[in-house]
Image: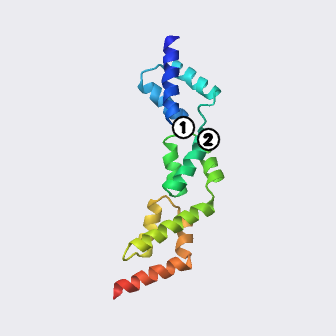
Amino acid sequence: MEQLEQAKAAALKFVAARVRTRQEVVQQLHKKGYPQEIIAAVIAFLQEYQYLDDAAYCKAWIHDKMQFHPCGRQKMAFELAKKVPDRQLIQQSLEQYFSREEELELALAAAYKKLNGSAAVRPEQLSRFLYSKGYDGVIIARVLDRQEIIQQLDQKQKDNNF
């Protein structure tokens, strides 16, 4: 019983620092050497008192990612999967909190930044850059179809040919 209380205290201290996922708490307690049955009891306790909520974690994580480290849906899903094993929850969260329009706007902002920061950028380079940021082919095609992007790419090529 004492080991259970120690595990609860360790878990509470861990979740007090910032929002954590169920998987993170399990890993932390496992790392500290607690047996599986104690970990399961602690997880049940934390969920009962709403200290763990993977759906709320996904929402907050997506919001923060969009604000501070924008990237595409594919990269977000990959990074979230490291913290939340429920792929269905990840997909639902992305659909709910990260619209295709928002993703396109972030991709356009990244493209403009790349174009303004480089002397010469070819369309295939811009495409690879956006792909590396986690944007899918549909979003990349929509960015490359934008008239103002086409004009900037053409201008960069003309400037470099002289």
- Identify residue type, mark 1: Val
Label 1 Cα neighbours within 10 Å, binned few <14 / some 14-19 / many ≥20: some
Res 36 seen here: no
Q: Residue at x 55, y 80 (%)?
A: 147
Q: Where is residue 17 in the image (x, y as percent from the top left)?
A: 49, 34
Q: Image check: 47 left or right of 120?
A: right
Q: Where is residue 74 in the image (x, y as percent from the top left)?
A: 52, 55
The image quadrant where one finds the C terminus is bottom left
The residue lying toward the viewer, choosing from 49 and 158, is 49
Res 121 seen here: yes
Note whether 78 is above or below 116 in the view shown: above
What whole-number distance in Å separates the C-alpha atoms at marks 2 and 1? 9 Å
Note whether 107 is above or below 152 in the view shown: above
The quadrant where residue 113 appears: bottom left
Please identify the residue farthest to the top as the structure is shown.
1
**In the rendered image, which residue does mark 2 sit on?**
56
Mark 2 and mark 1 residues within 8 Å of each other at the beta carbon: yes
The residue lying toward the viewer, choosing from 111 and 82, is 111
Tell me, for residue 19, which label it has, or none: 1
The residue lying toward the viewer, choosing from 127 and 107, is 107
Q: Residue at x 45, y 79 (%)?
A: 153
Q: Which residue is drawn at 46% across and 59% down?
A: 133
- Identify residue type, mark 2: Ala
The quadrant where residue 45 appears: top right
Decide which of tag 2 and tag 1 comes sooner along the chain.
Answer: 1
Q: Which residue is drawn at 49% across and 58% down?
A: 134
Tell me, for residue 91, which label it has, or none: none
Q: Where is residue 48 in the image (x, y as percent from the top left)?
A: 64, 26
Q: Is mark 2 on a helix, strand or loop?
A: helix
Q: Where is residue 139 in the image (x, y as percent from the top left)?
A: 56, 65
Q: Image check: 117 left or right of 143?
A: left
Q: Is mark 1 on a helix, strand or loop?
A: loop
